Amino acid sequence: MSLNAIFNTATSGLTAAQTQLRVVSDNVSNVNTPGYVRKIAEQQTLVSQGVGSGVEVSRIRLATDRFLQAASLNAGAEASRQTVRYELYDRIQSLFGDPGGNSGFFAQVDQVFSSFAAAAEDPTSSPRRQEALFRVQALFDESSRVSTQIQAVREDADGRLQSAVERANVLLQQIEGLNAEIARSTVAGGDASGAETAQAALVGQLSELMDVKVSVRPVGGVSIRTGAGVLLAGQGHATLEYNRAGTVTSETAFNEIWVTEPGGQKRALLESITSGEIKGLIELRDKEAPATAERLAELMTRVADELNRAHNANAASPAPATLTGRNTGQTFESAIAGFNGRTTIAVANAAGVVQARAVIDFAGGAMTINNAVPAADATTFLAQLNAQLGGTATASFSNGVLTLSGAAGNGVAIADDANSPSNKSGRGFSHYFGLNDLVSTDRVALYDTGLKLESPHGFTAGQTLTFRFSGETGARLRDLTVAVPAGSRVEDLLIALNDPATGIGRFGRFDLDGSGNLAFTGYGNPAPALSVLEDRTTQVPSGVSVTELFGIGSGVRASRADGFSLRTDIRQNPSKLALGQLNAAALVGASALSAGDGRGALRLADAGQASAAFQAAGDLVGGSISVSRYASELAGDIGGKASLAENRQSSAQALFTEATARQKAQEGVNLDEELVLMTTYQQAFNASARLIQAAKDMYDTLLGMM
């Protein structure tokens, strides 16, 4: 070997050792730097014409373990998802207060019924009446507050969703920018480890927003895709688009999150992600919070309905001059059809003495009033009823509302027959029309309409409503607009809705049950979720829409919790609270009402224990259960879900901590290991330096011999 070859070999060793020592120095100086990945200087032999000619540092790479990195990214995405779900659901749970305390929301439900039990002991006591009414109004005020705050949590989630999308766009731009820098350094043979470290940190931040898959590009840098393969970075960066909804209500239709790939293809982001903060926000906003709001609304609807059931069976003393019903959402002909049993309408003076009475018998589908011949039908019922009342009171129907008004200072009271009470869809005559409701609402709250397939639907042909169908991930499948058909029957409306070509028949079907409930059943497993984007239908004469009449979609059902309140005239005058009962057998001239009667108060107190027909709400099916029991189960369900969310968050965070610890153990700086490497490289440097010195001595000796 020539002296020049020895010099070159030694010099290459010096250069390689210097580079390796610089790498070790960088590692040691960044031992406590968060996110720093240890550098490794890879050394290889230089060969010239088959003969070794020294060494060189072929590249400086990061000590990255792709398996551990992927595990850490996936665990981080799941931890972010569960953290945001727990954080926001915990806020929802806190809205209801302590489930086991006396001041929480669910305790107020039982306090309402207890207050009527106290009023039954002294029905003439004004303070006890006022206490009962205060409890009722406080409960519905609180339900409205909780419902509003649940929507506020959803609005917060929606705002955070937009922020997350904006952060994702910034991260993708930065990652792609570093891709270009890393590729340039790789081609030029430079040190790209600094850019790679920064890029790894950005990828970690991106994975907290959505689950991603990372692969190394041959030219340096990384290629990033979602779990479903949507390209986010590596050949240019993708762009995410989302416009938040603004003020959020239970019926808000949210916009889609779109991702436009570098090649220009636009897709729904939710179809391709399964974890991350964005996924957690979507799940809370679109599933968990709405389910809680819908169950709350169903509870308050049944509380109001059972109180109204009892109050409609009661009578105040003196009887109120006017009984104004609720909007049934139907024509009178449809509303009066389908009753059976008997009921009595009595007109009484201030002393409770009957001035006139009308005994209505719905037996056999006929409508006989005081056994008058011929029997009334739907078109003659009001006229015959007014004739039998003889001017002491008047019945009228307008815009879906039945009204009974006494004349000359008389009041009106109603009672069903004890042996054969009137009934339609599980409600008596007064209860069905809401003539003596204790709790009123500004919207349709009961969806067991009593309509039959042959009933007129009352909507104008050509009016439209638009449905949205969403998949299991929450991504939109299809928006469909359906027009009201020319046919006037409910059956015609169902046929139009279920038409596979012009309706929703490709995704599911609507069915009308025996009580007039309209229910949607989706096809497939999992079945698509249905929501209403727009409803431009208006029923004549009630003025309600198809969505409002039948309660289509969880949004309109959840909105009911905001609309309940104590009836205005009773709130202003507690003496109008019906705590007694009408003696339906009392004839004209006899007393039928007593101011000291407290039987009706006991009926109101027992309303919380009576079985009520709860409909499906949220993620639970309906069934027959008491209001108090349903409230207890809802309290347990909310607490259980909050506890489950906390456990999931803790588990996901523990898994992320473990995955991160293992990744750091592999990629982090170990001072002992670096000390060993530093010693090794110093010795290599010294060996190369001694080789140069030896070659120099040989060279000097040769020169001296000449």
Image (cartoon, rainbow, N blue to C red):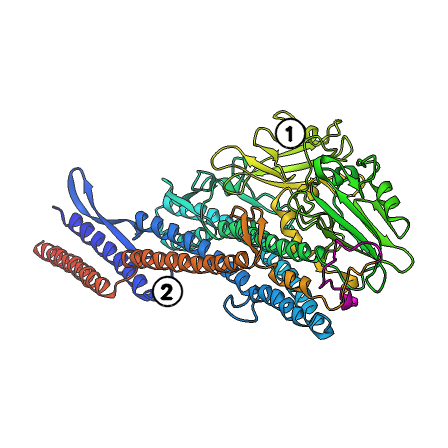
Circle nearer the N terminus (1, 2): 2
Please provide percent x and percent y for residue 380: 84, 37
Q: Secondary structure at mark 2?
A: loop
- For the stretch drawn in magenta, the main secondary structure is loop
At x 68%, y 56%, the residue is 308
Residue under circle 1? 503
Q: Position of residue 645 (x, y in %)?
A: 44, 57
Give above or below for 361 relative to 128: above
Residue 61 rendering spot, x and y as whole percentages: 31, 51
Q: Is residue 315 left or right of residue 513?
A: right
Near-viewer residue (116 or 443): 116
| Residue type of the residue flagged with mark 2 | Thr
Q: Amino acid at mark 1?
A: Gly
* In this rendering, position of residue 255 left or right of residue 208: right
Magenta highlight on residue 573: yes
Say whether residue 252 is visible. no
Quarter of the image where one finds residue 302: bottom right
Tag of residue 33: 2
**Residue span colored magenta:** 571-589
Q: Disc 1 and disc 2: Cα gap in Å?
A: 60 Å
Q: Position of residue 650 (x, y in %)?
A: 39, 60
> Which tag is nearer the camera, tag 1 or tag 2?
1
Q: Is residue 79 magenta?
A: no
